[in-house]
């Protein structure tokens, strides 16, 4: 299973990184691997989020454990984790949705 995570550092964490630059991607890689996953990419970014990463985990519980662990560290003011699905999975979901029988509320 693949996930996209976007996180924002606290002002204190950014200040610490400026004073003592660190490769946080390597620190994150170690945590993900310890939880049975694999880091595909880690980027610093600007805008709403300071870092963006794509990673694989064996299951949702492991992905949640990663999110909880990095949140508990106190360096992040926010983290958003999104499960990614393949185009093939999306196509299957669309076909299944077409057969679901769902009808929107009447106006």
Image (cartoon, helix red, strand yellow):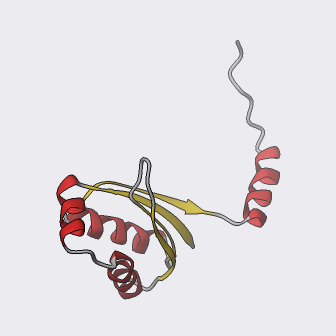
Please give left or right for residue 66 compared with residue 20 in the image.
Answer: right
Front position in the image: 62 or 22 = 22
- Give the image location of residue 3, x and y in percent: 52, 67
Q: Quadrant of residue 29?
A: bottom left
Front position in the image: 70 or 47 = 47
Taking 50 as reference, is 53 above or below it? below
> Which residue is farthest top?
107
Taking 102 as reference, is 17 above or below it? below
Taking 4 as reference, is 24 above or below it? below
Taking 49 as reference, is 66 above or below it? below
Number of numbered labels in the structure image: 0
Which residue does the image show at 38% across and 66% down from the upper left? Answer: 64
- Give the image location of residue 69, x and y in percent: 27, 70
Q: Quadrant of residue 76?
A: bottom left
* Quadrant of the rendering where the C terminus is positioned: top right
Which residue does the image show at 21% across and 53% down from the upper left? Answer: 11
Which residue does the image show at 28% across and 77% down from the upper left? Answer: 22
Q: Is residue 75 visible?
A: no
Which residue does the image show at 18% across and 69% down from the upper left? Answer: 19
- Give the image location of residue 1, x and y in percent: 57, 73
Q: Is residue 106 visible?
A: yes
- Give the image location of residue 13, x and y in percent: 21, 62
Please give left or right for residue 96 compared with residue 3 in the image.
Answer: right
């Amino acid at each position: 299973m693949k996930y996209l995570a976007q996180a924002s550092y606290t002002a204190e964490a950014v200040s610490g990184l400026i004073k003592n630059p660190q490769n946080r991607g390597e620190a994150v890689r170690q945590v993900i691997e310890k939880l049975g996953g694999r880091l595909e990419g880690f980027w610093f970014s600007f805008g709403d989020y300071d870092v963006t990463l794509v990673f694989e985990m064996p299951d949702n519980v492991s992905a949640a454990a990663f999110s909880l662990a990095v949140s508990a560290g106190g360096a992040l003011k926010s983290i958003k984790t999104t499960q990614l699905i393949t185009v093939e999975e999306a196509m299957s979901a669309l076909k299944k949705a077409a057969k679901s029988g769902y009808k929107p509320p009447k106006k």
